[in-house]
Image: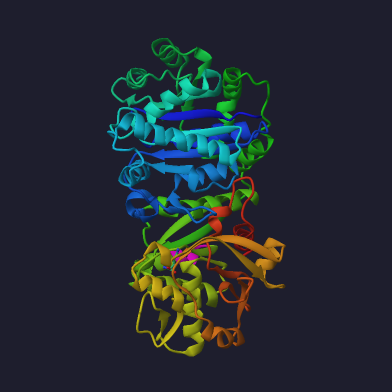
Amino acid sequence: MSKPRFIFVTGGVCSGLGKGIVAASIGAILKAADFRVFSLKFDPYLNVDPGTMSPYQHGEVYVLRDGTETDLDLGHYERFLDVNLTAESNLTTGQVYQEVIGKERKGTFLGKTIQVIPHITDAIKKRIYYTAESSKADFLIMEIGGTVGDIEGEPFLEAARQLRQEVGPQNALYVHVALLPYLKTSHELKTKPVQASVRELRRLGIQPEIIIARADYPIKKEHLEKIALFCDVPLEAVFPATTSKSIYEVPLNLEQKNISQIIFKQFGIVKKPNLHSWNTLVRRIKHPTREVSIGMVGKYTSLGDAYLSVTEALNSAVYHHNAKMRLQWIDAESLEKKDEREWNALKRVDGIVIPGGFGTRGTEGKIAAAKYARENKVPYLGLCLGMQIATIEFARSILKTKNVNSTEFDPKSANPVIHIMPDQEKKLLKREYGASMRLGSWKCRLVKDSLSFKAYGVDDIEERHRHRYEFNNTYREQLEAAGLRIAGTTPDGLLVEIIEIKDHPWFVGVQFHPEFQSRPLRPHPLFREFVRACLNK
Ligand code: GLN
């Protein structure tokens, strides 16, 4: 296809509706019709860098191949579309203003008055055209974060309106996702808030072609008819989307009602998507033949979103094995305090995952969990911090001293088996906080006969990183002689990327974050083999 097509997805009534999942599902459907799809998410908040936002407030920091730190929605897009997104895939209000004000400071605008319209909206449109072109996508799906009616979102909606004027209605489409609340007293769903949110959109000059009606309860035909009538949308373009058990059902549910045909009609395309692999996935999710329990030892245990990509990667691996996962959140600090209930929970799981993390809190509990996994031959997967924890634990066991640590947790440790490499330290001293992190995709060479090599089946891999500390090479020989396998390093051999424990059925720690490259239709080899080991335990 020569010209890119633009699809905007807006949200109405409230946030948290799964607008991103709907947008990503539409993308998955288009991809299943052999189109190239790329996504661009607009975040109306003022932060310039979502990577520095607290995971407490915001869920995990998702890392792209090019090292961009972004928010977890981009993870959904990468998983559903099976593409590698880039820095161009996310735009915040802060970034737009920074760019426009930067130009103003340089005098680019020759002293003109700088305004939201046209300067901010032009900058947004420029970015849309640029992303469409650089990604070479047939379809660019753009989710506008927040809810229609939010003050912050207006420049993005205005840019969306203008863009359609520029490219013509045959090249742009608006999808609106809105909630039908349920009233307990009258046992019914209400359509009025949806109508009001569409009215608000129309006030801004946007008439959606497709409305996705979200609800937690079954949506009746009369609700859809009412929405169609009041919002001036054909009935076949109003889609019911009741909360489904698995997010991976959403593409199938939308396509069951022929959403692709409404979209293609608008763009003048004749095509049918092939959702066979999604069907197979959902069949597996719905009909598991066995169960596996995985213990995730972490710090923000009350906040599953902080580890979203890890749980999704585990899920995909579990589905691959036709199984169902019982995910047990285990609080590292409770383990540290020798809480009996928490320890009993840990002892019951089939496998242990220690995900990424920062800071000292709970680390001794994590070290205790790694020790338990090593001594009791429980499958172990350590992700970034989880690899460092396993290294500390193993080193403590052979050096027979507790004075082994990462300099992150004990800057004065006598045996810093995990430390900051000297050239990185200089950057840290200069307080270039972000700059001191190893970010994005790095090449890694695997060692034959390792568990990792068996899982990947190739010599060279690339994985995404986000950390400051590294395995300390001073201890390499000593630890290897004692039974630690260095299973992967950077191709120059300088940075240790994977450790394994030789005398163990499956114990792997990786300095990177494999979870960011796992896809529902293509589970990551390490997660797949970890889950296999758990099932065989
Ligand atoms: N805190 C560790 C480091 O900075 C691990 C980071 C992580 O797990 N992402 O090296």
Q: Which residues are magenta?
A: 345-349
Q: Is residue 356 left or right of residue 442?
A: left
How many numbered circles does the render carry? 0
Query: Which colouring convention does the figure follow?
Result: rainbow
- 206 shown above or below 394: above
The answer to whether residue 521 is seen in the rendering is yes
Looking at the image, which residue is at 61% across and 38% down?
Answer: 136
Residue 415 in the image: state x and y as whole percent. 43, 86
Viewer-nearest residue: 176 or 389: 176
Q: Is residue 247 left or right of residue 523?
A: left
Residue 381 in the image: state x and y as whole percent. 54, 65
Residue located farthest toward the front when viewing the structure as drawn: 110
User: Which quadrant of the structure image shows residue 477?
Assistant: bottom right
Looking at the image, which residue is at 32% across and 38% down?
Answer: 110
- Magenta residue check for 347: yes
Residue 253 in the image: state x and y as whole percent. 56, 29
- Magenta residue check for 206: no
The answer to whether residue 215 is seen in the rendering is no
Q: Quadrant of the C terminus?
A: bottom right
User: Which quadrant of the structure image shows residue 116?
Assistant: top left
- 503 shown above or below 459: below
Magenta span dominant secondary structure: helix
Residue 89 in the image: state x and y as whole percent. 49, 43
- 133 shown above or below 172: below
Q: Quadrant of the N terminus?
A: top right
Looking at the image, which residue is at 40% across and 86% down?
Answer: 403
- 410 shown above or below 2: below
Residue located farthest toward the top when viewing the structure as drawn: 229
* Image quarter for ligand 1: bottom left
